[in-house]
Image (spheres, helix red, strand yellow):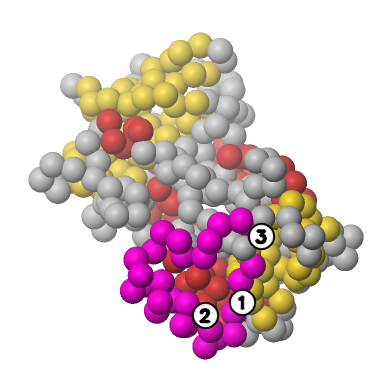
Amino acid sequence: MPGFHRLRPSYDLVIVGGGHAGLQAGLKVGLLNHTGLVLGRGPKFSRSFYAPKMDNIPGFPEGISGHKLLDLQTAALKAVEGSVGYLSPATVVGARRAPEGFEVDFDWLAQRQVARGRALVLAMGVIDRIPEVGAEISPIFPWANLGIVDFCILCDGHELKGKTVAVLGSDAFAVRTALDLQHFEPASVELLTLGRSLLAESPAEERQELTGQLARAGIGHFESEMVGFDGLRERRFHVRLADGTVRQYDRGFSALPWYRMNHEIPHALGARFDVEGYVVTDEDCRVLAQEGGEPIPGLYCVGDQRNGWNQIPEAWATAERAVIHAYAHYL
């Protein structure tokens, strides 16, 4: 299906992003008998693509991989391809208001194209910061792809009971993540600060408070830089440090800030952002304006890019709310 849709002069909704939220929005557009276009860079750009098993997806009691779930959602979208197109890989480079709604510029088949829609749904997601070794992110991929290194406490915290865990990060978020993991009853938790000083950028009062909480919880930290990994054959996370030591864990847990939050397009459209960098919306996922705080007519944001919980069922729910609101008010 991707790559064979013939562009229409205009659509009821244009959806930027082909992850779980964007695919669900596209499906809902078709089910509501409207025309739509989903512009996605490809499944591998979804945060869940490499997740080997997710346990919080309704209808899959044995769990399902992120790759398989994206395949199933793409197949569902194909069922409404008479009214909803899906172009992938397509790279969106800009969007703007137009007299009849919105215009979206994107690159597809080595050409610059324009999609026009009465309403626009932003579903571009966010990008995790991957722990680096020697300025490269690839060394940790084998451990992440097997689920030995996790990125989401709400998705994977339940798997840590009785396990030794390394939390990767040095700031207040990493410390709070390490403390929060105690709820899941791991055997032990340690912080690896990746060559940085623990809480170096935190105010003195916060640093004192969090350091005390770590001490009371028995959570130690190591500030030597990571230089490599071992233990893959045993399905364990062994970390080689620059000081020559090797720390051995059952699981790793990344608590690094986002690498990219895809601000450019919502910023150009006048969106408001919260203090953490997420696009601010109302309960119908209408984007609120930076100036005045009122909803921007016809503009929605769903999934991980929107303020709220970063969970796939939540992404689906936001997609449903946005498209239903557009159906009722703009279409």
Residue holding disc 2: 214
> What percent of the width, then of the height, locates residue 17?
47, 38
Q: How far is the residue under mark 2 from the one under mark 3?
A: 18 Å
Q: Position of residue 124 (x, y in %)?
A: 44, 40
- Measure the C-alpha gap from mark 1 to mark 2: 7 Å
| Residue at image location 34% in from the left, 32% down from the top | 265
Indicate the secondary structure of the residue bearing disc 3: loop
Mark drawn on residue 224 = 3
Instruction: Classify mark 1: helix, strand or loop.
Output: strand
Q: Are marks 1 and 2 in contact (CB under 8 Å)?
A: yes
Q: Tell whether 167 sits left or right of 103.
A: right
Quadrant housing the N terminus: top right
Residue depicted at 34% across the width and 66% down the height: 203
Q: Earlier in the sequence, mark 2 or mark 3?
A: 2
Amino acid on which disc 3 is placed = Ser
* Residue occupying the far right of the picture: 233
Q: Is residue 30 visible?
A: no
Task: Provide the residue span drawn in magenta.
Answer: 194-222
Q: Mark 1 or mark 3: which is in front?
A: 3
What residue sits right under mark 1 in the picture? 220
How crowded pointer 3 is (Cα within 10 Å; few <14, some 14-19, many 20+) is rated as some
Residue at 61%, 49% in the rendered image: 130
Label 2 neighbour load within 10 Å: few <14, some 14-19, many 20+: some
Question: Left or right: where does residue 192 sit relative to residue 261?
Answer: right
Hey, what amino acid is under mark 1?
A: Gly
Image: 178 above or below 119: below
